[in-house]
Amino acid sequence: MGEESTRAEADPLGGRGGRRTITQMVVVGLIASVLGIALGLVIDWFPTQRSTQAEKIDTFWDVLIICSVPVFVLVTTVVLYSVLEFRVKPGEEHLDGPPIHGNTRLEVIWTAVPAILIVGLVTYSYVVLRDIEKAPALAAGQKERVVRVFGEQFAWTFEYNEGGRRFTTAQLYLPAGESVKFQVQSKDVIHDFWVPDFRLKIDAVPGITTSYRVTPKTSAVGPHQIVCAELCGLGHAFMRQTAHVMTKPQFAAWVQRTSRAAGGGGGGQAGAAPDAKALFTNGSSATGATACGACHTLQAAGTSGTTGPDLDQVLKGKDPAFIKQSILQPDAQIAPGFSKGIMPPNYRSTLKPAEVDAIVKFLSDSTK
Ligand code: CUA
């Protein structure tokens, strides 16, 4: 007994088990590290990579796993070993542990190893960051595509400036294979603009403009979810929209259509009356107005959404002025059992006045 405690004093790492326990601990630690790293690399953490930046970010993530799992295992095994080996034994309740007065070699090691690890990872992350933030190579006279992104409770709006024509949409449209720079702003509280398939995300902070660049891959053609990644209020979970990646000709055609439609003033597709039922059920892909029927039940349109009030009930006997206000200023009056800020506040910009009037008439007629 006496012999054992002297050994513990001489070598603070020795404990009661001595060298053999340390060897066992190292073996267990190595096996646990290898298993942990393998598990960390096998797990499919992210959706399919849909931007050129995504590959570098995912590789960086893998490197972080490889470096951090052994550190986690080391700390955990040392803690568990200490708890088992140095716990108070019967009869030792009034004793203090053996005094330990520093161990220079150990202190140098546990300062140097983490320092080298951190400097290495910081350098690597700086290199990755510089790489993914790089400005695109542009032909002479060509200007970088910039899309301004506005966050507000609880919707995103996107402002384009294509060939000198400015227009706003509620869904994001991007050409594949071309770099785009997002300039992100908030109209109220802090939001966070994130397209998981692209990997990058950044806070939308009131009063300042933040930005990042992304290049959707050509394999990205199709819809991708946009998510608000910062808790911003009751409707945070609903602050989700869609980024549509298109081929370059599709995008050019979309810009033509949308800038003309948004140009307003009676130009564009004159004549045809808006189809209110279609707008209600499907929304408008041209301007990105979200479909009313996705959240509202309305028998006349055959929709059964439950996120918002059942319109057959809440609009029964209401006059058109009330219905119009409910579309354009959703928070002015809230149906019992529902909350402010859930309904997109941007129909004023995503629907044309004639479309709003048509929907108001359709709703008024079908809920008499
Ligand atoms: Cu906006 Cu969460």
Image (cartoon, grey):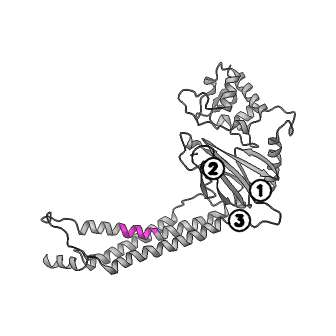
**Residue 226 has which mark?**
2
Query: Which image quadrant is residue 282 in?
Result: top right
Q: Report the side of 31 relative to 270 (left or right).
A: left
| Magenta span contains residue 195 | no
Which residue bears the numbered disc 3?
Answer: 135
Is residue 114 or residue 195 the one in the foreground? 114
Q: Is mark 2 within 8 Å of ligand 1?
A: no
Dot 2: element: strand
- Position of the C terminus, as image quadrant, is top right
Q: Position of residue 30 (x, y in %)?
A: 39, 74
Q: Position of residue 242 (x, y in %)?
A: 67, 48
Query: Which image quadrant is residue 307 in?
Result: top right
Dot 1: element: loop
Inter-mark Cα distance, 3 to 2: 23 Å
| Magenta span contains residue 70 | yes
Extent of the magenta region? 68-75
Quadrant in which ligand 1 is drawn: top right
**Residue at the front extreme, as displayed:** 207
Residues at circles 1 and 3 in contact by the CB criterion of under 8 Å: no
Q: Report the side of 337 relative to 104 (left or right).
A: right
Q: Earlier in the sequence, mark 3 or mark 2?
A: 3
Q: In front of the other: label 1 or label 3?
A: 3
Magenta region, main secondary structure: helix
Q: Is residue 176 above or below residue 189?
A: below
Q: Residue at x 52, y 71 (%)?
A: 121
Which residue bears the numbered disc 1?
Answer: 247
Q: Report the side of 81 relative to 143 (left or right).
A: left
Q: In front of the other: label 1 or label 2?
A: 2
Q: Residues within 10 Å of mark 3 (few under 14, many from 20)?
A: some
Q: In front of the other: label 3 or label 2?
A: 3
Q: Residues within 10 Å of mark 1 (few under 14, many from 20)?
A: some
